[in-house]
Amino acid sequence: MRATHLAVDPKRLWSTLLETAAIGGTAKGGICRLALSDEDRGVRDWLVAAMRDAGLSVGIDDMGTIYAVRPGRDMAKPPVAFGSHLDTQPTGGKFDGVLGVLAGLEVMRVLNDAAIETEAPLCLVNWTNEEGARFAPGMTASGVFAGEIDKDWALARTDRDGIRLSDALDGIGYRGSERAGARRFSAMVELHIEQGPILEEARQDIGVVTAAKGMIWSDARAVGCESHAGSTPMGLRRDALCAFAELALGVERIACDEGPDGVATIGVADILPSSRNTIPGEVRFTLEMRHPDLAALERMDAAADRLAAAVMENRNVALSIERIWRKDPITFDKTVAATIRAAAEGLGYSCRDMTSGAGHDACLVASVAPTAMIFVPSQGGISHNEAEFTSSAECEKGANVLLHAVLALAG
Ligand SMILES: [Zn+2]
């Protein structure tokens, strides 16, 4: 069989998706498989057995990440890596992360069936704790792998019951001896569902993910003066809520001005003292801004400061914005992205370049290996939800693009 005619087996891929979905499966058809839980151990055991069945050599690092290598003709070359994560949100769907791992397994099986040997070895990866639902933050193991998160700090993270990540790793028997980050990859490709509406609305099969948004998170306060709601004339008020409202609408405008890629969200706002006949003296709120272009993200950030200064002066209310976290935008590797695009076009699939608004393991690995991502459509743009759905035909297309991109990268 010529490599160009290779294709994944969609029935086999779909049946692995359904089979593993039963491990932590919920009544509404989703999955609850929190990182390092018994369910996570169950699906890891399933995966390791399937990897060994496929003749792959399995390794586990000290963050619990699982690697399975298929040899190449030139073992001196670092492998081409692909994979994602098998942990889910508490009310997660069947595709977020899971598709990337199981499509990777399908790629290995197809190559075995066709007896194809690649030049560089291949490595299928299942990263630990991508979701961050049990242990915050997410993308923990890929962050440690890439050197962006300190390992000891990560291992000391605790869940709501005070259980340390390191103890949970030991508890399910998945703390390996290999040092996280010791492996080198010549490239990494992550197939993932889009988790948004763009591909479905555009009726396109494949997203070539060329970038991921950067973000700035802040804790902010508006401080005015509490006073009587009946006897304080409107002109003499220092109403923290009204100042906050002006700022909130202004922040929306700032994001729209940097549209369509700029987004800004105020997800939390507490009004103090929260009494119906007292003018609000203080509002405490969060602000997060995202943009794929660093200069634009910095423009948005500076515009928020200018807006706060203007509102402060007009309303005689103190406004402070304290930046608590920042992650610069990622540009994925152009060569890997071009390889994905060529694979999609070669298969006759429609595709478009996209930017990821969400974080993924690939965003971390991108700092240590040439990396890019493949997106497939999410029905209704719904994700982190038990109703999350991507059809078998859409999964098949994504897996075929993964297969041919990996073949092109590995030679
Ligand atoms: Zn995911």
Image: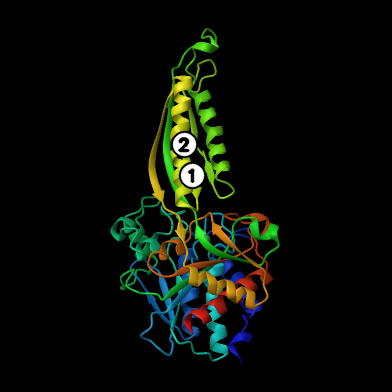
Q: How far across and down, in percent of the image, does residue 91 sit?
A: 56, 54
**Against 90, is 57 above or below?**
below
Tag 1 residue: 289
Measure the C-alpha gap from mark 1 to mark 2.
Answer: 10 Å
**Against 249, is 58 above or below?**
below
Q: Could you say which quadrant of the image residue 384 lies in?
A: bottom right
Q: Do we see residue 198 in this rendering?
A: yes
Tag 2 residue: 304
**Three-letter amino acid code at disc 2?**
Ala
Q: Residue furthest top?
A: 231
Q: Quadrant of the N terminus?
A: bottom right
* Mark toward the start of the polypeptide (1 vs 2): 1
Q: How far across and down, in percent of the image, does residue 307 sit?
A: 48, 32
> In the image, what residue occupies the spot 41% across and 52% down?
327
Numbered marks: total: 2
Q: Which mark is residue 202?
A: none
Q: Are marks 1 and 2 in contact (CB under 8 Å)?
A: yes
> In the image, what residue occupies the spot 53% across and 88% down?
112
What colouring method underlies this structural image? Answer: rainbow
Q: Residue furthest left?
A: 152
> In the image, what residue occupies the spot 42% across and 40% down?
218
Foreground residue among 34 and 249: 249
**Against 28, is 223 above or below?**
above
Under 8 Å from ligand 1: the CB of mark 1? no
Disc 1 is placed on an element classified as strand
**Three-letter amino acid code at disc 1?**
Met
Disc 2 is placed on an element classified as helix
Count residues near mark 1 (Cα–Cα under 10 Å), then give few for <14, some for 14-19, many for 20+: many
Count residues near mark 2 (Cα–Cα under 10 Å), then give few for <14, some for 14-19, many for 20+: many
Under 8 Å from ligand 1: the CB of mark 2? no
Q: Is residue 396 left or right of residue 167?
A: right
Q: How far across and down, in percent of the image, does residue 373 sit?
A: 52, 66
